[in-house]
Image (cartoon, rainbow, N blue to C red):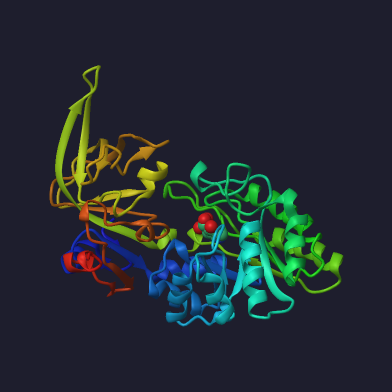
């Protein structure tokens, strides 16, 4: 891949160094257009990528926010969102000051455990709130995800109020005068439409148990195909499924029911690229004497965790003056663990057929917009990366590279 929109990847690296995260604004706009009409209310699960330009683009397109911490709420507000546009879904509990923050700022809360609902009830009571609206996240008893680690439904997931415990949720709400006017489920990240179809049906049945329901949020988890050789997942079929679900509920309750979804990945995965540099080559031999060729780059799991954490696939391109023929290559990073490999399958390093690069060439990693920068770290005292926006032939720095002083500032 030579260019992102109209800007040469080499020019981006020349200007901003490597590694560097790059977001294509026009690609982001394409995915926003694909997603924004799937439901009457579409929230962006901003944990996927909280870059301010991305947030502003969501805001300009009428997308609302799903936030998981008060810090995300504040970041969203700084980008221009109003409190009324934000739903707070801290996964299973509040941090100490979070219920107060949400109440003071009029932020709608979605409680993901019985304990969280109880805590919110106490905070509401303390403030003298009567019939205060709240949403509950329900664990429907099953889930789906691209990895076990991102499956957030079923008995082995900590998320949500277990579907058999809904009467306990009602009792807690009654005790504190809370009005459960929202129900929500999010069964995992990176699943497929078949799972979503079944679970949306289940949520409809759970919703019927709550007489005050006004909002039904079907969560995120829209599929995204990372392999550019395969067709992208068609998500347009989700809209009629959601419409049918809401029709059933509107008929049941005889009033309007608001339908919400809150995808993250599908909005941003495809617009993000991580550019790095090939630094060196190496090779080993396995027990049978087969040669294994390594391409060593300056992109590690401190910058992009997904291959290391989940064995996730990301498309890789090299950009250089004279690339060699395609051969089996294992592409690795600078971090001091053997798992620091970008080419993985089923959480194992594997070789991929790629044209052989040379030191100094550029590596372009695609599908890096979602859970890329957002999950990066200072491991190995590697600075957090800059984020750059490309629009046509315009290149704008959105976040500067961390430096040593930034990293040392909190030390006492
Ligand atoms: C509560 C909640 N909603 C939405 C999402 C977004 O999921 P995805 O990025 O798969 O759309 C997540 C992420 O796991 C989540 O935890």
- Give x and y (percent) for residue 108: 61, 74
Q: Check the image and name the residue furthest to the front.
A: 126
Quarter that holds the C terminus: bottom left
- Of 241 and 142, nearer the camera is 142
Q: Check the image and name the residue furthest to the top.
A: 288
- Give x and y (percent) for residue 349: 33, 35
Q: Is residue 17 visible?
A: yes
Determine whether, in the image, residue 324 is placed left or right of residue 226. Answer: left
Q: Is residue 237 visible?
A: no
Q: Residue at x 30, y 49 (%)?
A: 301
- Give x and y (percent) for residue 261: 62, 64
- Give x and y (percent) for residue 60: 49, 80
Q: Residue at x 25, y 40 (%)?
A: 337
Q: Is residue 205 above or below residue 253?
A: above
Determine whether, in the image, residue 316 is placed left or right of residue 117. Answer: left
Q: Is residue 376 above or below residue 61?
A: above
Quarter that holds the N terminus: bottom left
Q: How many marks?
A: 0
Q: Is residue 28 above or below residue 360?
A: below
Asked where in the image residue 135 lies, by quadrant, the reply is bottom right
Q: Is residue 352 above or below residue 101?
A: above
Asked where in the image residue 166 lies, by quadrant, the reply is bottom right
């Amino acid at each position: 891949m030579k260019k992102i929109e109209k800007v040469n990847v080499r020019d981006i690296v020349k200007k901003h160094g490597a590694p560097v995260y790059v977001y294509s604004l026009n690609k982001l706009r394409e995915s926003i257009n694909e997603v924004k009409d799937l439901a009457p209310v579409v929230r962006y699960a901003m944990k996927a990528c909280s870059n301010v330009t991305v947030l502003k683009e969501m805001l300009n397109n009428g997308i609302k926010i799903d936030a998981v911490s008060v810090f995300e709420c504040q970041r969203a507000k700084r980008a221009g969102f109003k409190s009324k546009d934000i739903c707070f879904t801290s996964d299973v509990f509040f941090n100490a000051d979070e219920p107060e923050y949400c109440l003071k700022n009029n932020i709608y809360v979605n409680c993901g455990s019985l304990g969280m609902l109880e805590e919110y009830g106490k905070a509401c009571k303390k403030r003298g709130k009567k019939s205060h609206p709240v949403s509950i996240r329900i664990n429907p008893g099953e889930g789906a995800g691209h990895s076990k680690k991102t499956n957030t439904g079923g008995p082995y997931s900590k998320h949500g109020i277990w579907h058999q415990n809904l009467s306990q949720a009602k009792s807690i709400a009654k005790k504190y005068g809370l009005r459960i006017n929202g129900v929500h489920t999010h069964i995992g990240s990176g699943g497929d439409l078949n799972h979503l179809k079944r679970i949306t049906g289940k949520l409809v049945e759970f919703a019927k148990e709550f007489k005050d329901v006004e909002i039904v949020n079907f969560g995120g988890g829209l599929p995204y195909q990372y392999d550019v050789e395969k067709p992208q997942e068609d998500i347009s079929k989700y809209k009629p499924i959601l419409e049918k679900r809401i029709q059933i509920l509107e008929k049941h309750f005889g009033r309007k029911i608001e339908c919400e979804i809150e995808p993250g990945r599908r909005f941003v995965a495809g617009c993000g690229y991580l550019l790095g540099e090939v630094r060196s080559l190496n090779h080993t031999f396995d027990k049978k004497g087969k040669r294994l060729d390594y391409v060593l780059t300056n992109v590690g799991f401190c910058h992009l965790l997904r291959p290391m954490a989940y064995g996730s696939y990301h498309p890789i391109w090299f950009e250089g003056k004279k690339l060699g023929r395609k051969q089996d290559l294992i592409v690795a990073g600078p971090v001091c663990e053997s798992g620091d490999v970008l080419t993985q399958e089923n959480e194992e390093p594997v070789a991929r057929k790629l044209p052989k690069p040379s030191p100094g060439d550029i590596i372009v990693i695609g599908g890096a917009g979602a859970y890329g920068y957002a999950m990066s770290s200072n491991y190995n005292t590697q600075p957090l990366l800059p984020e750059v926006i490309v629009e046509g032939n315009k290149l704008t720095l959105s976040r500067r590279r961390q430096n040593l002083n930034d990293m040392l500032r909190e030390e006492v």
